[in-house]
Image (spheres, helix red, strand yellow):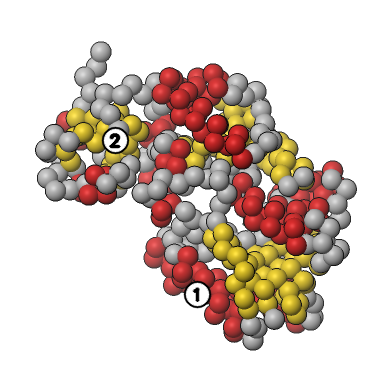
Amino acid sequence: MTIRTNIRVKPKEGRRARAGAPWLFSNEIEMSNAAKALAPGAIVNVLGDDGRVFGTGYFNAKSLIAVRLLDPAADTAIDTGFFVEKLKRALALRETFFEAPYYRLVNAEGDGLPGLVIDRFAGTCVVQITTAGMETQLTALLAALDKTLKPANVVLRADAPARALEGLEIYVRAAKGEAGRTAVEENAVRYFADLTCGQKTGWYYDQRENRTFVAHLARGKSVLDAYCYTGGFALAAARGGAKEVAGLDSSAPALALAEDAAASNSLACSFVKADVFEELERLWSSKESFDVVLADPPPFVKAKKDLEVGAKAYRKLARLAANVTAKDGLLMLASCSHNIPTERFAAECASGIARAGRRARLIRQAGAGPDHPLHPMLPESAYLKALAFALD
Ligand code: SAH
């Protein structure tokens, strides 16, 4: 048996972890020679200078978040059995909310598995690992997936940019079965996702409840879905009885999946390849408007340093989208940027709508659904914001 290395928290440091947060930053721990010699992602015990046990975690001397805790006890075995227990708990939570097996099965720290996201599409799981600590556990994790869900296909989407910060290789491959296109069922619509080449894991489960909201108010309305990707909001609105739906996106492969899904559900939607800012300007100048307008752009604030530029882009988008929202129409604006706080995003949306000369009532503020649980000590990991406004 190998003896596990102890990582020591510096005296008076680790305040958040003492209160229950699952992270220790590199400046909070003693970087001993033994610690520095550990391979990235090694399993360690974490102890305070006062003998306090922080628990079992994984360690990466090169990462700003040097320790991510996996268990409150020291010497916990991190093996297939550990992952089986975590996956069972994650699955039980999803099964209380969803009848069909389409959801985010694991949401990192929110499910006690830092560095790991798994999206489930019935018998196919897409695994996204972002830390060295989780990557070193891949064999145990895959064995646990087989014991709990027995998926026919497991796709490893090891291409998140965050992997570079942990010194991890970038790759996409099937660990089991096939990687490729799959069906997704949501809001009584059968969509398609490309698990290998699509964005992130191929599908955005985080918007499910916001799509439900839109489906419920779409009856008889004209709907514009800006940044429609594979048709998430557009087809939910069409299923909800919209009289006319248009989707805009710059990605031809995403639009092809949206069109296939529209055809397979016998729903009428028009999908157009366009730059959203340009197309909104064009629609505005040709005096076209829609009863319901949705805009769910890619992250405009990718890093903290981009906050001001990104905030301005959200404001402009709100203005252009309000311009094409019909009188008494509804406008929903979303942000998936970690790096803009909700209050700032809401302020930019309000300002953009006002600059369009419109008055608005904020009728809904939402985020991701219950298959995206958060660790309560890491509220900052909530990235999705969706605001719906009723315009005058
Ligand atoms: N609303 C979607 C997710 C949108 S993700 C859903 O519910 O699934 C953001 C989308 O913006 C991506 O599909 C990307 O291709 C698209 N995109 C990025 N820049 C764009 C631009 N300048 N114009 C149009 N679409 C763009």
Quadrant placement of the N terminus = top left
Which is more toward the observer, 360 or 298? 360
Q: Residue at x 21, y 33 (%)?
A: 53
Q: Quadrant of the C terminus?
A: bottom right
Disc 1 packing (10 Å; few <14; some 14–19; many ≥20): some
Which residue occupies 71% across, 68% down? 293
Disc 1, SS: helix
Question: Which residue is the extreme one toward the bottom?
Answer: 357
Observer-nearest residue: 367 or 264? 367
Q: Is residue 185 visible?
A: yes
Q: Position of residue 201 (x, y in %)?
A: 59, 42
> Which residue, as the protein is rendered here, is positioned at the far top?
1
Few, some or many residues within 10 Å of mark 2 (<14, 14–19, 20+) = many
Q: Is residue 277 visible?
A: no
Q: Nearer the viewer, residue 233 or 201?
A: 233
| Cα distance between the residues tagged 2 and 1 | 39 Å
Return the residue nearer the eye: 207 or 312.
207
- Residue 255 x, y percent position in the rendering: 74, 53
Q: Label 1: which residue?
A: 347
Numbered circle sitting on residue 381 = none
Horizontally, residue 266 falls left or right of residue 115, namely right
Q: Residue at x 52, y 74 (%)?
A: 348
Q: Are marks 2 and 1 in contact (CB under 8 Å)?
A: no
Q: SS of the residue at dot 2?
A: strand
Q: Earlier in the sequence, mark 2 or mark 1?
A: 2
Which residue type does callout 2 highlight? Phe
Going 73% across and 38% down the picture, which residue do you hit?
A: 183
The tag on residue 59 is 2
Up the image or down, 8 lies above or below 273; here it is above
